[in-house]
Amino acid sequence: MSAQEFVAARESIYLSNCCNFAVTALLVYEYLITLDREVALFWRRRVTGASVLFFTNRYLVLVVYLLLLMYLVPMSDHSCLLLARSSTVLGYLQIIPQAAFSAMRALALSGMNWYMAGAVFLLAVVPFGTNMVTFSFSSTVQYNPLLGECLAMSNTTRSQAIIFTAVSRGCLMASDAILIVLTWYRLARAGVANWGDFKLRGSSFSGILLKDGSAYFLTLLLVNLMHMISTLVALSPLARSADHISYVSAFTYMYAHRCTRRFPTTPRLTL
């Protein structure tokens, strides 16, 4: 490794660590200030599918970011390999609770249409498949004492990374777009067809669903679009190196999980 490559790698690792520390601090802070509500709403009630989805989505992301901080701890190559595999797989598993949440929303908004819910789930879970394929290309995992971190190098080419990113984020955006259309269609049939109706019925369940549901899925759509654009720009030939990555993903994953935790699910919707 030349001096220039060492400096570039060290800078990339430093920025990545700063992003991980920032996200971890925000997650821990939010968990602490919302713990009392979690205890009241979930710990003291019977276990249901919704509570399992909530706990999985809430704590899996925290475990992943805590594991990422362990990359800074000196370790053997074997320990580095185990850490990289476990944190990577758990990180990809975060996608499944989000896909299940989207499917539940589609099921409710479509009048219990399982085909629509299945389509939304399959689109939302595509990133899990593409990420696992990308992970299968990773072959070099070792602790680098010069850089002071456990490193996992992927053998995917630039063109493969661009294809995987476009497919995974494109499917996620399609899933969000379907849910936005379903939200407006369902509420239009219920008599909340425009913002004028919303202002008159803003405190009703339909008005709340229109405002929060539309804002939620529109925001996720924009977040996924920003994620895709920033990653594709980082992978473009104009980037400084093929290993240059986008740091936006560290925050977009956290934001998506935060939205999922805070947006209420409705197993059956009657409008």
Image (cartoon, helix red, strand yellow):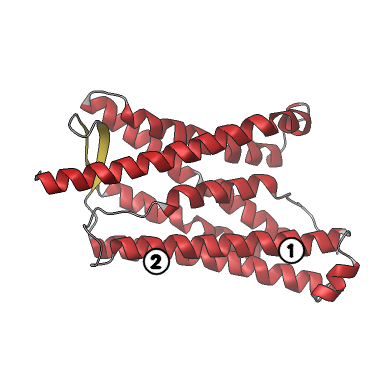
- Indicate left or right for 99 with 17 as reference: right
Q: Position of residue 190 (x, y in %)?
A: 86, 71
Q: Residue at x 24, y 53 (%)?
A: 243
Q: Amino acid at mark 2?
A: Ala
Which image quadrant for residue 185?
bottom right
- Mark number for residue 166? 2
Give the quarter of the figure containing the C terminus.
bottom right
- Indicate left or right for 228 with 84 as reference: right
Viewer-closest of 116 and 91: 91
According to the picture, the residue beneath numbered tag 1 turns out to be 109
Which image quadrant for residue 73?
top left
Q: Are marks 1 and 2 in contact (CB under 8 Å)?
A: no
Q: Residue at x 73, y 50 (%)?
A: 265
Q: Can the viewer see residue 29 in this picture?
A: yes
Q: Residue at x 84, y 63 (%)?
A: 206
Q: Position of residue 17 (x, y in %)?
A: 37, 39
Q: Is residue 113 above or below residue 153?
A: below
